[in-house]
Image (tube, rainbow, N blue to C red):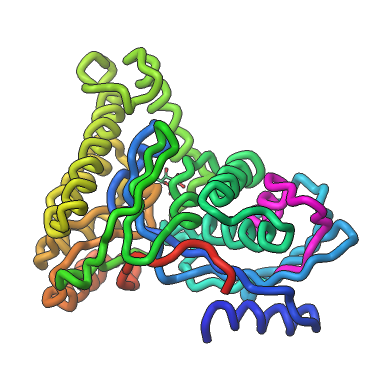
Amino acid sequence: MKAGEAARAVFEAEFGSEPEGCWCAPGRVNLIGEHVDYAGGLCLPIALPQVTTVAMRRRADGRLRIRSSGFDPVDIDLRDRQIDGWAAYVAGVAWALEPPGFAGADIAIASEVPVGAGLSSSAALETAVAVALADLCGLPLDDEGRERLAEACVRAENDYAGAPTGGLDQRIALHGRAGHALLLDFADGTSDHIPFDAGKQGLTVLVVDTGTGHRLADGQYGQRRREVEDATRLLDVGSLREARSAEPIADPLLHRRARHVIGEISRVRQAAESLRAGRIRDLGPLLDASHRSLRDDFEVSCLELDTAVDAAVAAGALGARMVGGGFGGSVIALCEDARVDDVRQAVADAAARRDLPAPAFLRASASGGARRC
Ligand code: GLA
């Protein structure tokens, strides 16, 4: 069953009526540019074909009733500011967006984006809710309108749900385009769609969900953000985007953190150049270098991610790295189509040998952003 139909079915079963419509938004993988969005950096994500869908009908009594199969029902007052858990990603968007004339809704959710896999299920949910509210309440859905929705979703995540994330996930979920990667510039807010069709070149972007849940609302992600801010102050620059080298920083830990950010931004530039020239294979060594930097300098990897990356590369992947915030979640491996089965087998075997959870696999192809469905 498609996600749109699934959300509609939950809606009809739970509320006994038809929704006004269904809207969906994708998960994402970031090809490269990790932990640099909040440092004024560059990121190069693609939107996934897997989407989260919301079915919605407006109410007039100030209530939000939210249903999702597998989760407890949530009934809240729109003015409530103390919502915990997944429903905060829904209520927070209504709070941040303040759509004109909006006075509550019945909402059903169905998702194909694995939760806690580092594939941005929360941003998929936020942005699906945002386009639904925008569409129903007459807010524009052109590029500019979408940028405003992305900003509201980031506020919802930072100030309402309490996850201090940087904006990469919401922007790709809203602006993603089929067959393209999106070069996002967090220094000036611009973006550029770059053709990216790995399949045409006989390549696969294999996503390995290690089955180890990651959490962004816990301390580690916020800790890294603070370290980046400290390094920025020590280098006396507006953001690490302006820094050329971490050399002046004596503190070894902050030195490593800054070295990651500066190196990663330069890798994104090289990756974007390769894609513009149609040389997707050249991403391979950049992915490997990105992973080493995230593992050793930024210290956001973990045994499950390293095991998957090492096994993928040993089995012939052109390059592999962890994606997303880290501390669990997923890995991407760029593979020649002919090697995909070997890589999957090697990654699964390596996890089994170490008694780690059995990984799940999906193929990433650059897909479209949030939309009515
Ligand atoms: C998470 C955050 C993003 C970004 C990545 C790391 O996905 O939500 O804002 O910081 O981690 O690149």
Q: Is residue 224 visible in the rendered structure shown here?
A: no
Q: Is residue 67 left or right of residue 258?
A: right
Locate residue 352, reporting x and y percent.
Answer: 25, 71
Q: Quadrant of residue 311?
A: bottom left
Q: Was residue 99 drawn as part of the magenta stretch in this picture?
A: yes
Q: Is residue 82 left or right of residue 31?
A: right
Locate residue 91, reporting x and y percent.
Answer: 71, 54
Q: Quadrant of residue 289?
A: top left
Give me the residue at 81% from left, 58% from top. 76
Q: Which residue sits furthest right? A: 61
Locate residue 105, reporting x and y percent.
Answer: 78, 64
Q: Which residue sits furthest bottom? A: 1
Span shown in magenta: 86-107
Q: Is residue 315 left or right of residue 30?
A: left
Task: Identify whether 103 is placed above or below 110.
Answer: above
Q: Is residue 249 visible in the rendered structure shown here?
A: yes
Q: Is residue 305 left or right of residue 1?
A: left
Give me the residue at 68% from left, 45% from top. 96
Locate residue 3, reporting x and y percent.
Answer: 54, 78
Q: Was residue 127 drawn as part of the magenta stretch in this picture?
A: no
Q: What is the total number of numbered labels drawn onto the structure image?
A: 0
**Camera-nearest residue between 190 and 237:** 190
The C terminus, quarter of image: bottom right
Give me the residue at 16% from left, 75% from top. 337
Give me the residue at 23% from left, 14% from top. 248
